[in-house]
Image (tube, rainbow, N blue to C red):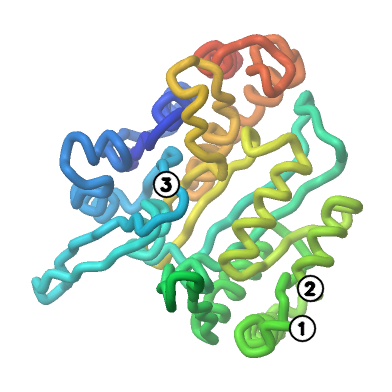
Amino acid sequence: MQRITVIPGDGIGPEVTRGACDVVAASGAAVRFHEVPAGQRAEREHGTPLPGAVFESVSETKIALKGPTQTPFGGDYRIHVERRDAAGKTRRSSYPSIAIALRRELELYVAVRPSKNYPGVPSHFENVDLLIFRENSEDLYIGMERMIDEGTAEAIKIISLRATERVTRFALEYMRKLKRRRLTIGHKANVMKLTDGLFLKTAQETARAFPDIAVEQRVVDALCMELVMRPGEYDALLLPNLYGDIVSDLAAGLVGGLGVAPGANFGPDCAMFEAVHGTAPDIAGKDLANPMAMILTAVMMLRYMNEGQAADRIERALAAVLREGRAVTRDLGGEAGTRAMTDAIIEQMR
């Protein structure tokens, strides 16, 4: 029986995360859930949005299912983390968001974000099936910013050979398992000649060890244009951290929006599965949120756990509910609430 750390999150997080957990439980997968709070609830209850209990749980389970967590815009907001190292010494770090703190502290160096069409989901395009690999550990997201004077702020962009080689190798091995055959590297090496230049060069050199996979490159702005014109021509994308975050949201828009976009983060020791969407506080607690992204995220988690049969059952049940179009949320063209759509998927598995 595999234990899973569950982090419900903020806003609509608890609703969609509960729905995903219920669907996983109904699928027959051999799992047990261990819930720990992070975000606004944790700050109220424990005085910090990211208590040590989260890290303790993930250290034991090695798998986390995380709902969205709220991050304020602007200002000097930081998440402060204290952890003991192997020698027992306390190490203190700070990060601009809970999600980034978890990814950095747990060494989750790559994010995988699929974007594909599902029957019954309104979309401007057909035959989209993208797999996006986002480097998770560096770039501008390291959060090294400072005010130079009252009118000027500065941020540092870090790209390293080690991190780029690591994420490229992961992407190509992941693609090989899925029998995908074409990887496009997104970059801005025409302007960011040292940082993005290093990313592009290292990714290309690492890819030479995978001759069965074709590798090409696109300047990221041209890539975005081509994605919104001909998304079906792309198979898999590899991008640095900031571009990966932006392009994965763009790709979600190609197939129906963030409500249908799952995601996962992988490291050498553990994995954290989180949908791409945010907390949507305006509809939190109103039974309006689409649980599909979180359910598909849980499907990715089950496949990672070698619970393929349970994952297949959920995907078939979800596809049936989408095709019928009755018990789906408003963003999918229906009138059902979060709970009703979840229950309809569970009913399809009986």
Residue in view at x 54 percent, y 32 percent: 295
How many numbered marks does the figure carry?
A: 3
Q: Nearer the viewer, mark 2 or mark 3?
A: 3
Circle 2 sits in a helix, a strand or a loop, which is it? strand
Q: Position of residue 336 (x, y in %)?
A: 61, 11
Tell me the quadrant of the picture where the C terminus can be found: top right
Residue 323, placed above or below residue 70:
above
Q: Which residue is mark 2?
A: 219
Q: Mark 3 sits on what residue? A: 72
Query: Looking at this rendering, what residue extends furthest in the left direction?
Result: 88
Where disc 3 sits, the SS reads loop
Label 3, label 1: how far apart the Cα atoms are:
33 Å
Q: Nearer the viewer, residue 164 or 242?
A: 242
**Is residue 48 shown above or below 239?**
above
Work out whether mark 2 precedes mark 3 in sequence or the reverse, and give the earlier one: 3
Q: CA distance from mark 1 to mark 2?
A: 8 Å
- The residue carrying mark 1 is 190
